Amino acid sequence: MTTPLLLQTRAPTNVIGMITSGTLPTRIVLGVLAVASLCSLYLIISRWRRFAKVRHQADAFIERIEKATNLDEAYRMIRAIRSSPYARVFKQGMEFLKDLHVADGFGNGRGGISLVQLEALRLILEKAEGEELDELGNGLHWLAIVGSVSPLLGLMGTVIGITNVFLGIAGAGGSNIMAVAPGVGEALITTVAGLAVAIPAVIAYNYFAAQLALVRAELEGFSSEFVGTLAREENV
């Protein structure tokens, strides 16, 4: 059985001492928060690298697209660069058109697609966009969970710690500030730890959510431009 904080002969005088001499519930809460912090850090680093790579790929894709004079030429140029969310959406649209045997007529007024086929193309582009956005957003919900649950875990640890302090006071039949302070300090450590874990997770989640919204808008704009190019080249 853990010795009540008020009955310890030597009170800790620093944060490390409070943690190492803390009660079992406090250690459990801090352990869970430490695991959550490590998982959050891994997600932040991995998603940051992924979004940075996507932004670089977007620049390369746009540069190639702007140099192309028609969709056929754009398709040949895009096939020469590394795969990216933008390139994969474009390739799926082009493969659909080639399956309809109209791609060879781009820009020459030969062949075309019906309105039904055009709607099917839109659905294919939307499906490709959704798949790419799902991959980019993978794991972001865990950042939201860590950001919302960590402060509650910290608060729970604080409540448990304060409860132990009052139980110690009741058991000792009296108290003074020197006896109560270590227990209160230990209890408040879990609140600080919970906030320290939650704040970076919330900031990262909002940043990545904004980046994901930007990619979504770019993909939707590109799909609309794709269809518009078909119309300009008289393939619709």
Image (cartoon, rainbow, N blue to C red):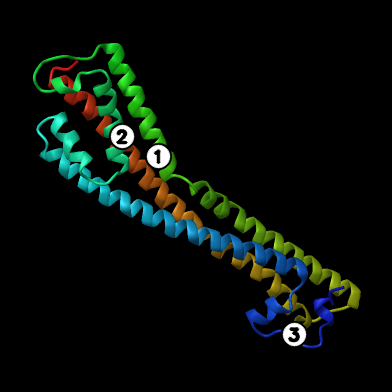
- Cβ–Cβ under 8 Å for marks 3 and 1: no
The circle on residue 155 is: none
Looking at the image, the residue that sits furthest to the bottom is 10
Q: Around disc 3, counting alpha carbons within 10 Å, would you say few (fewer than 14), some (14 to 19), or many (20 or more)?
A: some
**Which of marks 1 and 3 precedes in the sequence?**
3
Q: Around disc 1, counting alpha carbons within 10 Å, would you say few (fewer than 14), some (14 to 19), or many (20 or more)?
A: some
Q: Nearer the viewer, residue 110 or 14?
A: 110
Q: Quadrant of residue 112?
A: top left
Q: Secondary structure at mark 3?
A: loop
Q: Which residue is mark 1?
A: 133
Q: CA distance from mark 3 to mark 1?
A: 53 Å
Find residue 95 and report its horizontal and vertical position in percent.
28, 27
Q: Residue at x 76, y 64 (%)?
A: 160
Q: CA distance from mark 3 to mark 2?
A: 63 Å
Question: Relative to 149, does residue 215 appear above or below in the rendering?
Answer: above
Q: Nearer the viewer, residue 194 or 57?
A: 57
Find residue 88 and report its horizontal and vertical position in percent.
31, 37
The circle on residue 89 is: 2
Q: Residue at x 16, y 14 (%)?
A: 111
Q: Disc 3 residue type?
A: Ala
Q: Quadrant of residue 93?
A: top left
Q: Around disc 2, counting alpha carbons within 10 Å, would you say few (fewer than 14), some (14 to 19), or many (20 or more)?
A: many
Q: CA distance from mark 2 to mark 1?
A: 11 Å
Q: Secondary structure at mark 1?
A: helix
Find residue 196 and report its horizontal and vertical position in percent.
55, 65
Q: Which residue is mark 3?
A: 11
Q: Left or right: 232 with respect to 23?
A: left
Q: Left or right: 236 with respect to 20?
A: left
Which of label 3 and label 1 is nearer to you? 1
